[in-house]
Structure formats: structure tokens, C-alpha cells
């Protein structure tokens, strides 16, 4: 089993940084940490989404974007695979079932796979982008 991190950027090491949580989200989602998930498809969604707030329903596998016009389906994205046994338990903060904040300064991934942002729609259904009607879900910014 791996933990995953999704990004639009290619790295040799994952480094902690200050996260920005959308309004209304718990403060644990805005730590200075490396955020990992046990859910590969959540990492894929985090990497593929355009700038701005996205509402991601991890149960229904639906997603909506504040800025769908900025979604680039042919953009290369990166999914980083991390062996959780290589991270000390005292460096892990379990935010919720889908997010683990790691307070290590950096992590060397065990492997990296590349995808296209458009691969997201093999697994998620896009919901109308009217942000006032977006269902509440796991918001990511």
C-alpha cells in the first residue's frame, strides 16, 4: 500500500509547504506539511483540477470547479507514491480518512507516474460549475 500526492509539478523530493484551505474548512487543512492521501483517485483529482476552489465528493466521485474554463485536459500531471512505513508515526497528522499531513521537511517518493488531467474524467463525473450550487464535499484549494 502507498500514500499518494498529486501535483502539476515534477519533483525529485516532496517538500513541506504552507497549505491554503478554502473558507469553512478545518484549520488542519492549512498546516505547513506535505499532504498525502491513501486514495489514489483523490490525488489524481488534486493534481488535475484547475486553479481556484474545487468541490470533490470522494464517495460519489463527482467534482466541480470554480474555473472550469482553465481546466487543461492535455496537461501532464504527476502522482507521487510514498511508502507509509518510511514515515515516522509522530510526523503524521491524520486530518480525515483522505488526508494525512506529514511534518517531515522532505520526502523522497518511491515512484512517480505521469497522467493527463483529462484522465480525471475516467473516474469522476463533472458537476455544473455554478459554485453556489456545487454540493458540499471535500473542498480543495
Image (cartoon, rainbow, N blue to C red):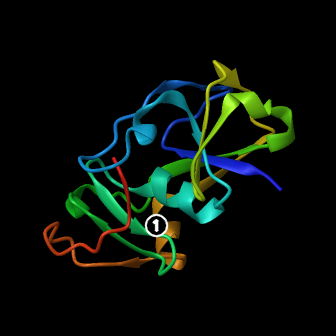
In terms of image quadrants, where is residue 54? bottom left
Total numbered circles: 1
Q: SS of the residue at dot 1?
A: helix
Q: Residue at x 45, y 39 (%)?
A: 28
Question: Above or below — where is 136 with respect to 7?
Answer: below
Asked whether the viewer can see residue 100, the reply is: yes
Q: Nearer the viewer, residue 38 or 40?
A: 38
Question: Above or below — where is 56 with respect to 89?
Answer: below
**Residue at mark 1:** 118
Asked whether the viewer can see residue 83, the reply is: no
Q: Residue at x 33, y 47 (%)?
A: 141
Q: Nearer the viewer, residue 20 or 67?
A: 20
In terms of image quadrants, where is residue 55? bottom left
Q: Residue at x 48, y 43 (%)?
A: 8
The residue sitting at the right extreme is: 85
Q: Residue at x 41, y 62 (%)?
A: 73
How many neighbours does mark 1 have within 10 angstroms: few (below 14), some (14-19), or many (20 or more)? some
Q: Position of residue 9 (x, y in %)?
A: 51, 36
Compared across the picture, whether 53 is left or right of 122 comes to left
The residue sitting at the top extreme is: 105
Q: Position of residue 62 (x, y in %)?
A: 41, 76
Quadrant in which the N terminus appears: bottom right
Q: Position of residue 3 (x, y in %)?
A: 72, 49
Amino acid at each position: 500500500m502507498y500514500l499518494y500526492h498529486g501535483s502539476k509539478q515534477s519533483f525529485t523530493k516532496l517538500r513541506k509547504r504552507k497549505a491554503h484551505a478554502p473558507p469553512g474548512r478545518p484549520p488542519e487543512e492549512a498546516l505547513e506539511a506535505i499532504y498525502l492521501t491513501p486514495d489514489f483517485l483523490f490525488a489524481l483529482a488534486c493534481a488535475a483540477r484547475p486553479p481556484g476552489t474545487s468541490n470533490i465528493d470522494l464517495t460519489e466521485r463527482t467534482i466541480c470547479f470554480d474555473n472550469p474554463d482553465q481546466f487543461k485536459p492535455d496537461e501532464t500531471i504527476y502522482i507521487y507514491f510514498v511508502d507509509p512505513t518510511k514515515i515516522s508515526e509522530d510526523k503524521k497528522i491524520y486530518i480525515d480518512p483522505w488526508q494525512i499531513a506529514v511534518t517531515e521537511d522532505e520526502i523522497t517518493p518511491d515512484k512517480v507516474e505521469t497522467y493527463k488531467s483529462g484522465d480525471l474524467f475516467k473516474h469522476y463525473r463533472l458537476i455544473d460549475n455554478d459554485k453556489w450550487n456545487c454540493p458540499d464535499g471535500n473542498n480543495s484549494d
